[in-house]
Amino acid sequence: MREVMRTNIAVLSPNLSRKDLHSSLHSSRRGQWLYPVVGADGVLLGVVKRKDLQRLSSGAEPRELSDVVHRDPVTAYPDEPLRVVVNRMADAGSRGFP
């Protein structure tokens, strides 16, 4: 799995302001559509989809980052066989995991 994992990704703090969110979106890698939300202790708190972040940063929705975080996401680990992760993706109906 390690060979196909993207490692240079933008991660978000749960306390990110709308102003900082806007700049994070513009400076993040193109093609990243799922953003891990990680606490100060390095623990994964959840994930946010790029489209939800774009709506938040535009001010179209009066919500906070914590309102759009998907908690307890299905994850993949570097030491897992790729076929195991692919099966998990199919079961979860997802095209990518943190």
Image (spheres, rainbow, N blue to C red):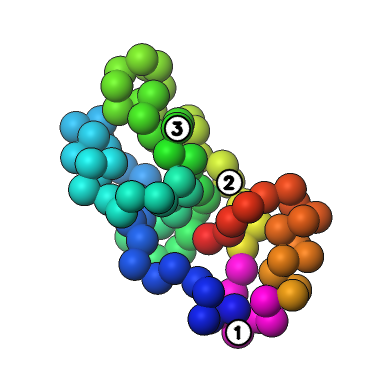
Q: Are marks 1 and 2 in contact (CB under 8 Å)?
A: no
Q: Is residue 91 above or below residue 42?
A: above
**x then y, percent, for residue 29:** 31, 54
**Residue positioned 28% across, 50% down in the render:** 28
Tell me where the magenta segment starts and ends, as one range. Answer: 76-82
From the image, tell me which residue sits under label 2: 71
Q: Is residue 79 magenta?
A: yes
> Would you identify the image quadrant in which residue 19 lies?
top left
Spatial CA span between label 1 and label 2:
23 Å
From the image, tell me which residue sits under label 3: 51
Spatial CA span between label 3 and label 1:
30 Å
* Other-residue count near label 1 (Cα within 10 Å), few / some / many at <14 / 14–19 / ≥20: few
> Would you identify the image quadrant in which residue 43 lies?
bottom left
The kind of secondary structure element at disc 2 is strand
- Between circles 1 and 2, the one closer to the viewer is 1
Q: Is residue 59 magenta?
A: no
The kind of secondary structure element at disc 3 is helix
